[in-house]
Amino acid sequence: LERMGDFYVKQGNLPMAFLQYDKALRLDRNQLSIRYKMGRLFLEKGMAEEAQNEFLEVLKVNPQHAQAFEGIGWVFFKTGDLERAEKNLQQAVALEHTLWQAHHLLGIIYDRQQNYEGAIQQYKKAISLNPNMAMLFNNLGMCLLLKGDYGEALKSFLQALKLEASNDRVYNNLGLTLCKLGRYKEALEV
């Protein structure tokens, strides 16, 4: 049932995935991997309270479950409670430093707090764990742009475009960076 649910997630059929996971949990309520996956599905559907409940159930059984802390961090981020999101995401990466999404989300939080050095550090950590995501390079570039490090921002946006050549947002950000560098003709072309 769990494998079928995973299959449906990959297919983008979340209602069928939910149905399979729910059937599996009816057989054994203590399946942590399934509870975590249910939490992620609730999170994707914008059902923050239900997602949080699933992640908390996981933590009741395993208080060291890094991904459950990451999930709760996402819940608080989506509901606008950045302080609690940061606390849970920090707990997640303290338990498992390879959670690139947690590092990325911490970067976004620090960005919003104008803690650019902290954000840059988190984005770079996320990139080291998942170097094939244009979004990570774009967010790093925006942080560097806001910090005033235009040369490094330019490099980051160019790397993002190598990974995803048709991303309008990256092109826009690249154009802004080129303007800041006084390269107006290139900016206009971009």
Image: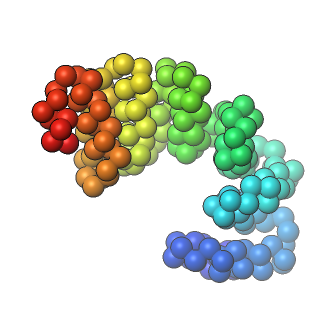
Residue at image point 33% right, 38% down? 173
Residue at image point 71% right, 63% down? 42
- Vertical position of residue 11 compared to residue 104: above or below: below
- Vertical position of residue 76 compared to residue 91: above or below: below
- Vertical position of residue 30 compared to residue 13: above or below: above
Q: 138 or 146, which lies in front?
A: 146
The answer to whether residue 114 is left or right of residue 179 is right
The answer to whether residue 109 is left or right of residue 183 is right
Q: Position of residue 133 (x, y in %)?
A: 39, 48
Q: Position of residue 6 (x, y in %)?
A: 60, 72
Residue furthest left in the image: 185
Task: Classify the position of the C terminus by image quarter.
Answer: top left
Residue 2 is drawn in which quadrant?
bottom right
The answer to whether residue 121 is left or right of residue 173 is right
Residue at image point 28% right, 37% down? 174
Task: Classify the position of the N terminus by image quarter.
Answer: bottom right
Q: 42 or 100, which lies in front?
A: 42
Q: How many marks on residues?
A: 0
Residue at image point 81% right, 44% down? 63
Q: Position of residue 78 (x, y in %)?
A: 67, 47
> Can residue 95 be spotted in the picture?
no
Q: 123 or 184, which lies in front?
A: 184
Q: Position of residue 137 (x, y in %)?
A: 37, 39
> Can residue 68 be spotted in the picture?
yes
The answer to whether residue 67 is left or right of residue 135 is right
Q: How is the image coloured?
A: rainbow
- Vertical position of residue 136 compared to residue 7: above or below: above
